[in-house]
Amino acid sequence: MPPDAYPRSEPLRWSRRAVLRAAPALLTGLWAGMACSAGPSTDAAGRLRSPSGDLLETPSAGEMPSFATARTQRVIDAYRYAVGNREALRYIPCYCGCGSTGHESNYDCYVYSVAKDGRVTYNAHGAS
């Protein structure tokens, strides 16, 4: 079909009603994007928390976080597995609903971040 088969009409103009209807969805998307891009914060007790509220700990190299060592050996082993097997866990989705908190895979339930020097910041989400 030739390019001029559909003549252009006037430029798209948003009516006041259309803007008011779209505003809540746009603002919700903007708020969600800001919440996901926020970094960790400190709670009233001085503990580091993820944007979704999970407890975070960065123990010394080779150590496990207190929320893992306070549980069973199975939990400790799960955290060790997560640190050593990121590639395997990144393909396993989490089924507890934490995707809404920004988790992209099961790995995110255990590990919040790994610094350039190799220090691991653990996420308490995997211990619950």
Image (spheres, rainbow, N blue to C red):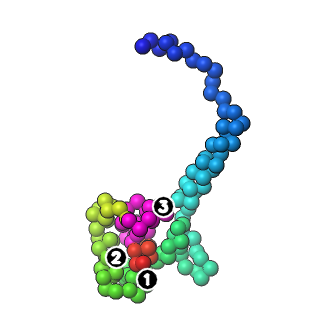
**In the depicted view, which residue is nearer to us: 54 or 38?**
54
* CB-based contact (under 8 Å), mark 1 and mark 2: no
Q: Is residue 30 visible?
A: no
Q: Position of residue 71 (x, y in %)?
A: 38, 86
Is residue 11 in view? yes
| Residue displayed at 34% across by 86% down | 72
Say if 19 sits above or below 120 in the image.
Answer: above
Task: In the displayed orientation, state which residue is furthest to the right.
Answer: 16
The residue that label 1 is drawn on is 67
The answer to whether 71 is drawn above or below residue 13 in the figure is: below
Q: Secondary structure at mark 1?
A: helix
Which disc number belongs to residue 100? 3
Looking at the picture, which amino acid does disc 1 mark?
Phe
Numbered label attached to residue 123: none
Query: Disc 2 designates what residue?
Result: 79
Q: Amino acid at mark 3?
A: Ser
Looking at the rendering, which quadrant does residue 111 occupy?
Answer: bottom left
Quadrant of the drawing holding the C terminus: bottom left
Question: Residue 24 location, x and y as percent?
Answer: 64, 49
Q: Earlier in the sequence, mark 1 or mark 2?
A: 1
Q: Which residues are magenta?
A: 95-120
| Circle 2 Cα neighbour tier, 10 Å, few/some/many (<14 / 14–19 / ≥20) | many
Question: At label 2, which amino acid type do we have?
Answer: Tyr
Residue displayed at 57% across by 71% down: 41
User: Depth-wise, is mark 1 or mark 3 nearer the camera?
Assistant: 3
Q: In terms of sequence position, does the residue under pointer 1 or pointer 3 come before the other?
A: 1
Estimate the spatial distance between the alpha carbons at disc 2 and disc 3, rounded to whole Å: 22 Å
Q: Residue at x 67, y 39 (%)?
A: 19
Residue 3 appears at what percent x and percent y?
Answer: 47, 14
In the image shown, does 15 or 81 lie closer to the viewer? 15
Q: Is residue 32 left or right of residue 127?
A: right
- Local SS, label 2: helix
